[in-house]
Image: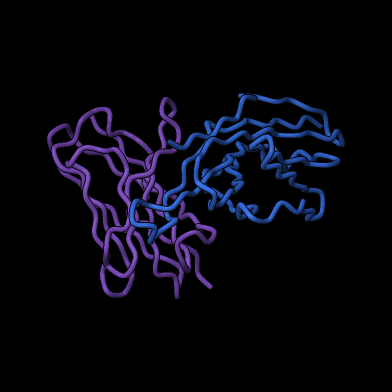
Amino acid sequence: AQKVTQAQTEISVVEKEDVTLDCVYETRDTTYYLFWYKQPPSGELVFLIRRNSFDEQNEISGRYSWNFQKSTSSFNFTITASQVVDSAVYFCALSLPNAGGTSYGKLTFGQGTILTVHP
Amino acid sequence: KAGVTQTPRYLIKTRGQQVTLSCSPISGHRSVSWYQQTPGQGLQFLFEYFSETQRNKGNFPGRFSGRQFSNSRSEMNVSTLELGDSALYLCASSFIEGYEQYFGPGTRLTVT
């Protein structure tokens, strides 16, 4: 069975602080995909990153960076020099193959981490 | 490119009624997935369609059904509505299953 755990329910920081959002996943499959999404107050989920299970290379995109470690089944997300506009709910998600191995279209989401960045 | 569109954006229904929600994917995307978001259960997968075939199904009762048309547009239907069906229903599309899914703004369903 698959599971995604985001242990941090809420995080509050002051602008310009760095913040790391934790994500731990469970699966026995060797091929899977991991994602991060942002849901701002407007409600629409915004795609941030996708990683496949064979690519453990860390990624940096502007102030965002992601650390994928298969050894600990973690896919953590760091925002450097946070800004008020980063305030949102952040979701980590896992995609596994269906029973026939024909689709990876089902995302299993964590419960989300509410990030509040104060000015 | 236009994003994923969902109609209607808001809906109020009475218990026992049925409802149909519509989703138009991003042009060129052939995979459409549906999710239910509630404060208590979070984001839960309903089903996924690719080329008019259901490829994945979540753990929801048979009252929840969906379909996909030849132009990749998708609909989901909920029959015999219950109070617990009140939620934000999100549709997402992707070019191929496993690729990133792009979400629409959702349909907020309220069952009274």
Q: Which of B39 and A96 is in front in this view?
A: A96
Q: In this view, does A94 lie above or below A3?
A: below
Task: Look at the image and name its color scheme.
Answer: by chain
- Asked whether residue B7 is in view, the answer is no
Residue at point 34% right, 55% down? B48
Q: How many marks?
A: 0
Classify residue B66 as left or right of residue B47.
left
Q: Quadrant of the C terminus of chain B?
A: top left
Q: In this view, does A12 lie above or below A67?
A: above
Colour in which chain A is drawn: blue
The chain letter of the purple chain reads B
Residue at point 61% right, 33% down? A24
Q: In this view, does B36 lie above or below B4?
A: above
Residue B61 placement (x, y as % from top left): 21, 37
Classify residue B66 by image quadrant.
Answer: bottom left
Residue A112 placement (x, y as % from top left): 57, 33
Residue at point 77% right, 29% down? A118
- Asked whether residue B110 is in view, the answer is yes
Q: Nearer the viewer, residue A105 or B110?
A: A105
Residue B108 placement (x, y as % from top left): 37, 42
Residue B58 placement (x, y as % from top left): 32, 43
Classify residue A67 by image quadrant.
Answer: top right
